[in-house]
Image (cartoon, rainbow, N blue to C red):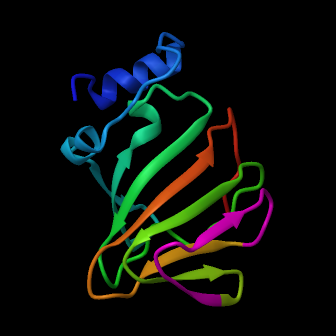
Amino acid sequence: MKQTRARAHDEARTGTTPAAMLLSARDIDAMPGTTKVHAFNRSGVRLDKSLGYAAGMQRLGAHLVSVMPGYFSSEFHHHHFAEECVYVLAGEGRAHIGERVVALAPGDFVGYPANGVAHAIEATGSGLLVCLVVGERLAQDVID
């Protein structure tokens, strides 16, 4: 992929991106991704490929997230203003939604409305849990 993540991010912030950008499967496979460890949950470890930034998107974040077994995608949290959703592509996991815990498998979708209940995703299978995570990029949000 010719465009770096940092360049895509800078262009997204400044509004100099093209009207649309295709990321082929080959482009996505070649993206190195960024390993992120959550500051408040050391078990919140994921490999994040920011598809939205790479495609020049400014208002919508789209991430290909891979989580190793036994780890969470983030901390247990909720957004006061932003909406978020998760589509499971591969692997097995659990969605912690408020006080409920539900099994996740490929093809499952979870939507988190703004000012909804706290949530987190946990990888529970023997391989990676791979999800497409999409959320709003608001000028400001409050996350508890």
48 on left or right of 81: left
Q: Is residue 72 magenta?
A: no
Up the image or down, 102 lies above or below 37; here it is: below
83 on left or right of 101: right
x, y (%) of residue 15?
Answer: 54, 13
Up the image or down, 125 lies above or below 143; here it is: below
x, y (%) of residue 47?
Answer: 31, 58
75 on left or right of 47: right
Q: Is residue 103 magenta?
A: yes
Query: In the picture, which quadrant includes the C terminus?
Result: bottom right
Up the image or down, 35 lies above or below 57; here it is: below
**Residue span colored magenta:** 101-117
Query: In the picture, which quadrant includes the N terminus?
Result: top left
- Which residue sits at x=60%, y=82%? 96
Name of the residue lying farthest toward the top? 16
102 on left or right of 130: right
- Which residue sits at x=40%, y=43%? 50
- Which residue sits at x=26%, y=80%? 127
- Which residue sits at x=79%, y=66%? 116
x, y (%) of residue 105?
Answer: 48, 81
Q: Quadrant of residue 124?
A: bottom left
Camera-nearest residue between 77 and 39: 77
